[in-house]
Amino acid sequence: MLAQYLDISPRVQEALKNGEPVVALESTIIAHGMPYPQNKTTALEVENIIRNNGAVPASIAIINGKLKAGLSTEEIDLLAKSGSRVPKASRRDIPFLVAKKSHGATTVASTMIIAALAGIRFFATGGIGGVHRGATETMDISADLQELARTNVAVVSAGAKSILDLALTLEYLETQGVPVVGYQTKEFPAFYTRKSDLKVDYKVDEPLEIAQALKAKWDLGIDGGVLIANPIPAADQMEFEPINQAIELAIAEVERLGIKGKETTPFLLSKIEKLTQGASLKANIQLVFNNAKLAAQIAKAYSEMR
Ligand code: PSU
Ligand code: MN
C-alpha cells in the first residue's frame, strides 16, 4: 500500500536495507528558502558533505504526487529553478498534493513525516519553524513543532531565527516533551548568531552521546523527535546588531503588507537577504553545511551502535 505513495531511490533503499547511516534533507529550503542558483549548488554540496562524512543523503520532496526519499540531480534542479512556483508543503498539504499529482517542497514537518515513512531517523536542515513573534495574538506557530512532538526523527538545526520568539518556541517544545540538545553548547543558538541568552536542556559533546540518548528514547517507545541545536561556526556568524536590525525591518514589512500564513517565513528570508546585501544567505549556506556534517556523524554513530 505504502509503495503506491512512497518512492525511495535505489541508493537510499540499499543503505536502509544494510543498516547504513542515512540523513534526510528538506526541499522548502531549496524552493522557498534560497534564491537560484545558490539553492541548487547548496543542495548538491550538502549531499556531498553527508557522503564525505560516511552517510547516505536522502533529499526529500513531493514529485508528481510521489513522496520521494532520494532525489536525482534533475529533480533538485527542477525544485531550485521553479522556486516558489512549487507549493510549500507542510503536514496538512501532503494528501492534496498527492491526490493532484502535484510537486511539493517539503518543510521540516513534512520532511520528517516522509523520512519516518521511509525508515530514516536523521535529518539536517538550516532552521526550524517555531512560535512567531506576536503569536499570542496571531497564533502563528509552525507545524514543525507539533511534528517534533510526534514523529521519530532527530533534526539538526542551527537553532531558530530570531524572526521567531525563541523563548516561546522553547516553552512550546518543553510542553510537547521535545528534548532540545545543544551540540557543544549550553546556549540555544539563534541561527545567524551563536548567542541567544536562552538555555538548551542538555549539552552534548560527542555525536555518540546523542545517538545513545536517541536509542534509549525510541527503545522505550517515547515517540517524537529531538531538536539538536548546532551553532553556526564562529567564523561564519553575523554581527548581532546589523542582523537583528534587518530582522526587525523585515517583520515590520510583513505587518505593513499584511502577509500571513505560509508566505511569512519565505518573505522574511528573502527580505533579510536583501537588507543584508546577501550576507545572511552566505551565513545560511555555511550553517547548513555544518549541520549536514553533524547529522551524518550522529547517524553514523547510531548505526554503529546497533
Ligand atoms: N527557517 C529557515 N529557513 C527555512 C525555513 C525555516 O531559517 O527555509 C523553512 C523550513 O522548511 C521550515 C519552514 O520547516 O520554513 C517553516 O515554515 P512555517 O513557519 O510556515 O511552518
Ligand atoms: Mn506559520
Image: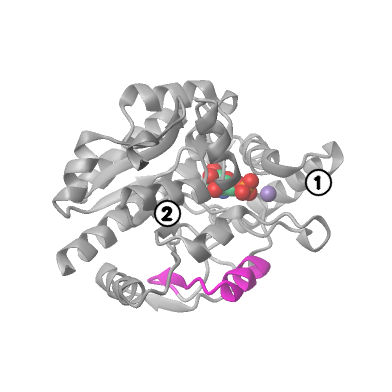
In the displayed structure, 11 sits above or below 213; it is above
In the rendering, at what x and y percent does residue 244 appear? 68, 54
Which residue is drawn at the image coordinates 80% and 40% (left, top)? 253
Q: Which residues are magenta?
A: 167-185
Residue at position x 31%, y 42% in the image: 58
Disc 2 and disc 1: Cα gap in Å?
A: 29 Å
Whether residue 73 appears in this view of the structure is yes
Q: Amino acid at mark 2?
A: Ala
Dot label at residue 235: 2
Neighbour tally class for label 2: few under 14, some 14-19, many 20 plus, Cα within 10 Å: few
Per the rendering, the mark at residue 252 is 1
Left or right of residue 293, residue 274 in this image: right
Q: Amino acid at mark 1?
A: Ala
Q: Is residue 37 visible?
A: no
For the residue pair 88 and 116, the one nearer the viewer reads as: 116
x, y percent for residue 44: 33, 33
Residue 171 lies, in percent from the top left, at 63, 73
* Residue 281 belongs to magenta span: no
